[in-house]
Amino acid sequence: MANSSPRFAPGQTLLLDADDTLWENNVYFERAIAAFISYLNHETHTPAEVRLVLNEVERETIHERGYGLASFRHSLVRCFERLSTEPITPEKHEKIVDFSRCISDHEIELLPGVAEVLPALASRHNLILVTKGNEVEQVDKLSRSGLAHHFTSVEVPREKNPDAYRTVCQKFELKPHTTWMIGNSPKSDINPALVAGLHAVFIQHPHTWILEHEEVDPAPEGQHLLELSGFVELGVRF
């Protein structure tokens, strides 16, 4: 956990996640899912049971189509078709699509401390955005966030696994002992980065997507793992 340890030396490379690390993201999906489950109003399945089916459908869709709003819309429609006792009409299809449309319409809401701390980090370290998802959507969110000028590069791999982190390190000739992955997802940000030999900073978020939940692995010998409660603590440590 964060403590009074001294700040790490300037010149580190900080790989930063975007969604739910720099700005709110999953909370908008959760609202859309809640509206969808209410609309479905299943006769026999509880809302929790419907959510479990949707989780499985999302896993299938991600495997087939990757991430992004189009995939999420597809998952909602497929879940409705799988659970509904009646065929989906054009009107119902449009209503389901509307649940996802509100996600793309919201303003970018930076998380506490990001606007103040990120410029200071960029003045002392090399910042690279490493975020999975739909590349067009992620670049658009970064542009609308007003944070793009703090990053020297933007990388959007299909998945953030150990090989993806090794590829980023090779591309930019990064040294593992001065490279950190910073994010809110144990599954995509922390554990695979540790496997790839990097240091990691886990910033907890109360609404991390359920498909990103995992136990945080301990850091291998010679690597650092910091667990922080908020982005503002990065300014103290880096």
Image (cartoon, rainbow, N blue to C red):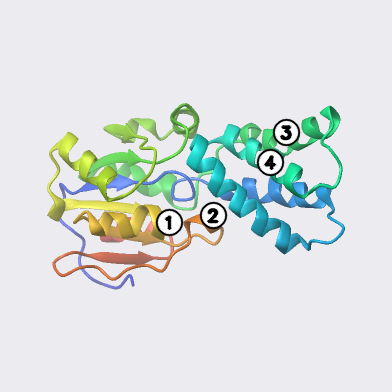
Task: Give the side of residue 88 with respect to residue 220, left or right.
Answer: right
Residue 156 visible: yes
Instruction: Mark 4: give few (<14), some (14-19) or many (20+) Cα within 10 Å.
Output: some
Which label's residue is closer to the chain start, 2 or 1? 1
Q: Residue at x 57, y 49 (%)?
A: 26
Residue 67 visible: no
Q: Residue at x 72, y 33 (%)?
A: 97
Residues at discs 2 and 4 in contact (Cβ within 8 Å): no
CA gap, disc 4 and disc 3: 12 Å
Q: Identify the disc placed on residue 78.
A: 4
CA gap, disc 3 and disc 1: 27 Å
Task: Give the side of residue 221 with respect to residue 136, left or right.
Answer: left
Out of 117 and 51, give the one closest to the viewer. Answer: 51
x and y, in percent, of residue 140 in the image: 48, 28
x and y, in percent, of residue 122 in the image: 27, 41
Residues at discs 2 and 1 in contact (Cβ within 8 Å): yes
**What type is the residue that disc 1 sits on?**
Ser
Residue holding disc 3: 97
Residue holding disc 1: 185
**What type is the residue that disc 2 sits on?**
Trp
Which label's residue is closer to the chain start, 1 or 4? 4
- Disc 3 is placed on an element classified as helix
CA gap, disc 2 and disc 3: 20 Å
Q: Identify the disc placed on residue 209.
A: 2
**What type is the residue that disc 4 sits on?**
Arg
**What type is the residue that disc 3 sits on?**
Val
Q: Residue at x 61, y 48 (%)?
A: 57
x and y, in percent, of residue 130 in the image: 34, 41
Instruction: Mark 1: give few (<14), some (14-19) or many (20+) Cα within 10 Å.
Output: many
Which label's residue is closer to the chain start, 2 or 3? 3
Residues at discs 3 and 1 in contact (Cβ within 8 Å): no
CA gap, disc 1 and disc 4: 26 Å
